[in-house]
Image: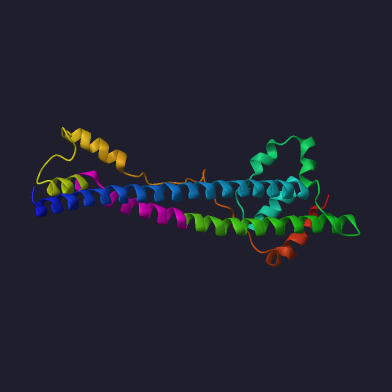
Amino acid sequence: MDEVDKALEALKVQIKKEIIDNYFADRVYLEEDTEILHQEAQAYRQEYDLLGRRFLALYQALGSEAARALVMEALGLKDWPFYQQFGALPEGARPELLKGCRRRGFTAWRRFRNLVFDLYEQLRQQAEHLRETYAKLATHLKLLNEDIDKFNLSYDFGLIAAQIEALEGGGEVISGGLLAPEREELSTRMRFKRLKLTDEDLPPAPQLPPLATIKGRLAQILEKCQP
């Protein structure tokens, strides 16, 4: 083997090494980014569960089915969020939902109204934060899937095999060769699966109007429905 042949052989080895190194480097990046996305989705779900507890506290503070119906109508919510969970709570456990809630006002009416206003404002702020987080997660998911598509396109086993076979002058990529089904199986295993987050994985938070825009209407409802 002369010097030219040695140089060409070394070049072939280097090219194949770069293909393998790039494949695993890009795959590790996708695996790490996928794990980050899962952690973000888990944190979102935990905060969403806290939002549910705030809704349950609001339902309890309103005190009656009539008040809840009127308030949900004022908020523009046809489906009452988390109300099934509230209905599943035993009557004796519901007062615990308001444990630690501050009661402001010199009269029972004022304390009732301010309690509902305070709970609603906390609820609205948390729902708004969740909606912003949801949008960021959706963008992260979209960008990650775009990277996955690029990865699968760049590291298609059939194309890589053809490139290496061309370097080898038509020789086998793997000693002994691979049958077509085996190549397809290996190609499938090398691909990275696109990710999908369902509403069950990432439930969207409801959009709630600012307290200032509905405060007057809420006050009228609460005055009519005060316990």
Colour pattern:
rainbow
At x 48% / y 46%, what residue is drawn?
A: 35
**Horizontal placement of 123 versus 219: left or right?**
left
Q: Is residue 44 magenta?
A: no
Q: Main secondary structure of the magenta part?
A: helix
- Name the one closer to the observer, 147 or 11: 11
Q: Residue furthest bottom?
A: 212
Q: Residue furthest right?
A: 106
At x 74% / y 55%, what residue is drawn?
A: 119
Q: Is residue 148 magenta?
A: yes
- Name the one closer to the observer, 13 or 124: 13
The percent coordinates of residue 131 (x first, y second) are 57, 57
**Horizontal placement of 140 versus 107: left or right?**
left
**Horizontal placement of 175 versus 1: left or right?**
right
Q: Using the image, determine if residue 176 lies above or below residue 51.
A: above
**Horizontal placement of 123 versus 79: left or right?**
right
**Which region shows up in magenta?**
139-159
